[in-house]
Amino acid sequence: MNMKNVVNKIDFTLEILPKEYSLTITFGEGQPGNSALKNFDGKYQTGSINNLLLGKGKSIKGKKLLISSIVTDANENTNHTSVTYTINGNEIKTFEDDVDTDNSSIYYTTTINFI
């Protein structure tokens, strides 16, 4: 069986260009998850993404960040999964979907466009 792939896009407007921006990714419904991305310095970040410094607004404006996340259904009470993207402490978007079968995983591919 193929793993479900949920493809998402977020357009995030940078309001203050001299400001530093950081990213946190969380998973809901009691389901564990991990993420992987290549930051704007060319370094790969994997696992838990918590307040990852992305850079100042003027240096990331016009760039895209591709994030891959895998969420596994470990909660016996639901097959529902979610992933939430937070920038500088503000939730910007949550995506949700159900896994196809108990104990399977779902793949979220998300691109954040910094405009």
Image (cartoon, rainbow, N blue to C red):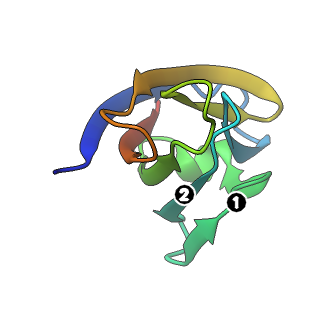
Q: Secondary structure at mark 1?
A: loop
Q: Earlier in the sequence, mark 2 or mark 1?
A: 2
For image coordinates 50% across by 47% down, the residue present is 71
Q: Amino acid at mark 2?
A: Ser
For image coordinates 67% across by 31% down, the residue present is 28
Point out which mark residue 20 bears.
Answer: none
Q: Amino acid at mark 1?
A: Ser
Q: Is disc 1 surrounded by few (<14), some (14 to 19) or many (20+) residues within 10 Å?
A: some
Residue 37 picture location, percent across and down: 49, 62
Q: Is residue 105 above or below residue 37?
A: above
Q: Is disc 2 surrounded by few (<14), some (14 to 19) or many (20+) residues within 10 Å?
A: some
Residue identifier under label 1: 48
Residue 65 picture location, percent across and down: 44, 50
For image coordinates 56% across by 24% down, the residue present is 78
Residues under numbered marks 2 and 1 in contact, where contact means CB atoms less than 8 Å apart: yes
Furthest residue toward bottom: 43
Nearer to me, 7 or 79: 79
Q: Secondary structure at mark 2?
A: strand
Residue identifier under label 2: 35
